[in-house]
Amino acid sequence: MKAFILAGGYGTRLRPLTNKTPKPLLELAGKPIIEWQIEWLAKNGADSFVIGIGYLKHKIRDYFKGADLDIEFIAEDEPLGTGGAIKNAELLLAKEKEFIAVNGDIISSLSPRRLSLHENDIVSMALVPLKSPYGVIKTKGSRVAEFREKPLLKGYWLNAGVYKISNKIFGMLPEKGSLEELFQKLAQKNRMGCTKFPDVYWRSVDSLKDMEEADEALKSGAVY
């Protein structure tokens, strides 16, 4: 199975750490995010990788020089969005009947191999429970009846940024634009499946707090 990693973003929310280092090369528990991702994907059946690069792309290429891995790079000269980034990699991905695509800042224990495409599906999306970022309170009159710190919001699911994608998608993708806009159209046409992962570790590394929590989870063995 081929895996595509979306690794071309600027990582603006993690500045100044990303002023000179692309976000995928920021270290967690002694290794860059993207190295953790490759190990995770390889454990789940990926045997070749395409990495979409943009911001500070030479540093990502240089990091993997001499690595004993089947890796190809596809560069963006300007930001293309998530949909445009996959479209840009068409020549490297379209020969595959299906492939895995992941956002380049995800740390998770979910298993991408569990995603499956049904006959009419273009995309199958991994879902994880939506967790409140705040404490949630129930009241009784002017009294606090119950306090729950950052609970899972029952019945609501979050896009985990992990997908299995049919090569039929390439005729639908924009040259420049977001993948999420296409998802809305596919959902309306009933051409999009999903798999729920209720009991996995998942973290999108978007802030210093995310980095700290993912670092601790990786060091403790809670992820892999």
Image (spheres, grey):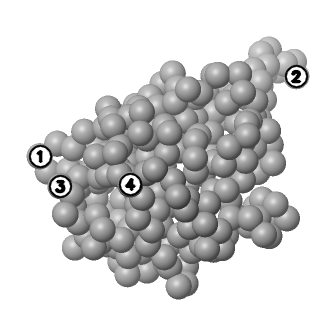
Question: Percent position (x, y) of residue 131?
Answer: 63, 33
Three-letter code, disc 1 = Glu
Q: Mark 3 vs mark 1: which is more N-terminal? A: 3
Please tell me which residue is depicted at 85% across the width and 64% down the height of the picture: 16
Q: CA distance from mark 2 to mark 1?
A: 54 Å
Q: Dot 1 corresponds to which residue?
A: 119
Q: Which residue is outermost to the left?
A: 119
Q: Dot 3 corresponds to which residue?
A: 97
Q: Mark 4 vs mark 1: which is more N-terminal? A: 4
SS assignment at label 3: loop
Three-letter code, disc 3 = Lys
Please tell me which residue is depicted at 84% across the width and 19% down the height of the picture: 144
Q: Which residue is outermost to the top?
A: 145
Q: CA distance from mark 3 to mark 1?
A: 12 Å
Q: Which numbered mark, 2 or 1, is in the foreground of this view?
A: 1
Q: Which mark is residue 70?
A: 4
Characterize the local packing of mark 1: few (<14), some (14-19) or many (20 or more) Cα atoms within 10 angstroms: few
